[in-house]
Amino acid sequence: MNNNPILINALRFLGLLMLQVLVLNEIELHGFVNPYIYPLFILLLPFETPHWLQLLLAFAIGLLIDIYANTIGFHAAASVAMAYIRPFLMQMFRPSGGYDNKEHPVMVVMGLNWTLFYITSAILLHHIILFSIEAGSFSNITGTLSKIGLGAIVSVFVMMLYQFILVPKQ
Amino acid sequence: MHNLLLFLKRYNSFFVFLFLEIVCAFLIVKYNHFQRTQFLSSSGVLTAGVLNAKNNVTDYFSLKQQNQILSEQNALLLEQINNNKKDIPEQEMLFIPEPEIMTPKKYEFIPAKIIDKSTLKLHNYLTINKGSEDGIYPQMGVVGPKSIAGIVHKVSKNYATVMSVLHKQTHISAKIKKNNHFGSLTWDGKNEFIVQLNDVPNNVPVQKGDSIITSGFSDFFPEDILIGKVESVSRLPGSNFHSIEVELATVFRNLSQVYIINFKDYKEIKALENATLNE
């Protein structure tokens, strides 16, 4: 398998997009919890990716998801915000040895704990923004909060599953 | 310029972020009906609140003008009522006459504002802000919003004084609404809310609460304008007439807007009467 990061990420972009649109969007646990996996594409971009490129890619994948789900702008806004805080999260969860010699923030490289913290905080932000926009008001705040909480748990679970199964050992 | 470029370069990702989020916000509002209506309605709440606050302030500036408009409108309505009332027979008409024929303009109501008044003297007058320039001449009837107010006394170019109903020399022809018996209305100068109806014979049934209206016999007022309600009825010993106290519908203390009744045929009638007297 070719180790070219551009190719890997391009494939991941398409793969996660299709997985989200074709499979996960059809899943609605308890009628309202919908797992999201496409943000993982941004979260797994290499450390060295320029920040502006991360933002643009986040916008692109979010907008594509929006087009399929008829929610123009929701996912784009949430994933752009998530992409924006990604470097700050990395700074926050910086391991003692730093990120030297590491290319990809994947679980096989970074370990389970780091990945769990990193993904959970990013997804929480993503879901908070996404469902706040969707609700459009504060009238049903408990409903919105439960959507955020349950949705984040399910999404993080799906993402961890993906990393266990599909991210190859380097 | 150099510093600006450095600044932009340093924070380039923030500006990209900002730009993309603005695009997202634009897309959300443009393409999603619910969010759009929420957005518009909340901004609607904002605009409505601001406009309301503004109106609360500016309303006071136009109050005078609004009052003027309203009173003119009222004058028009009163005019229509009083012009139509007597011209439409109660039985069916054989044909519908032309509006011109149906409503010859007998009465015209001119709105005016009271600029000064007294209610506590024995000879009370109102001063109004309409005068000969507005077509006011002495002996015109003046009504308030609820009932009669007085008769024009003296007229200057822009102002006029009105002899209030509360005047010792007032004599107004009135009748009891329910049985059309006539009497003469005077004021004894004791109570600003009560006037007296004289010359109603003892055999005429009168009860408390009966409406007293204008008779139409005087030249001042059209027929059927409310004056007030009977407050009490008593019989003086040795008299053949009721002593009727009438509570005025007009509260002179609160009166500020009046209408002067222009009786179109007044001059013709007066000329005829004078000619008769001089014979």
Image (cartoon, coloured by chain):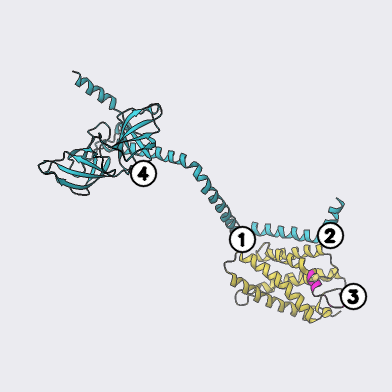
Answer above or below: position of B140 versus A161. Answer: above
Within-10-Å neighbours for mark 4: few <14, some 14–19, many 20+: few
Corner quadrant of residue A87: bottom right
The answer to whether residue A90 is magenta is yes
- Left or right, B40 with reference to B229: right
| Chain B drawn colour | cyan
Which residue is nearer to you in this view: A47 or B31?
Answer: A47
Question: Residue at label 1?
Answer: B35
Question: Residue at label 2?
Answer: B10
Label 4 and label 1: CA atoms lie apart by: 53 Å
Are callouts 2 and 4 both on one chain?
A: yes
The stretch of residues the image draws in magenta is A88-98
- Left or right, A30 with reference to B156: right
Q: Amino acid at mark 3?
A: Asn
Report helix, strand or loop for mark 2.
helix
Q: Amino acid at mark 2?
A: Arg
Task: Look at the numbered discs 4 and 1 and tell me whether their residues touch, using CB distance below 8 Å.
Answer: no
First reached walking from the N terminus: tag 2 or tag 4: 2
First reached walking from the N terminus: tag 4 or tag 1: 1
Q: Chain of mark 3?
A: A
> Which numbered mark, 1 or 2, is in the foreground of this view?
2
**The chain in yellow:** A
Question: Residue at label 3?
Answer: A101
Measured as percent of width and height from the top left, residue B21 is found at: 72, 60
Label 4 and label 3: CA atoms lie apart by: 93 Å
Measured as percent of width and height from the top left, residue B167 is found at: 28, 36
First reached walking from the N terminus: tag 1 or tag 2: 2
Q: Chain of mark 4?
A: B
Label 1 and label 2: CA atoms lie apart by: 34 Å
Question: Residue at label 4?
Answer: B254
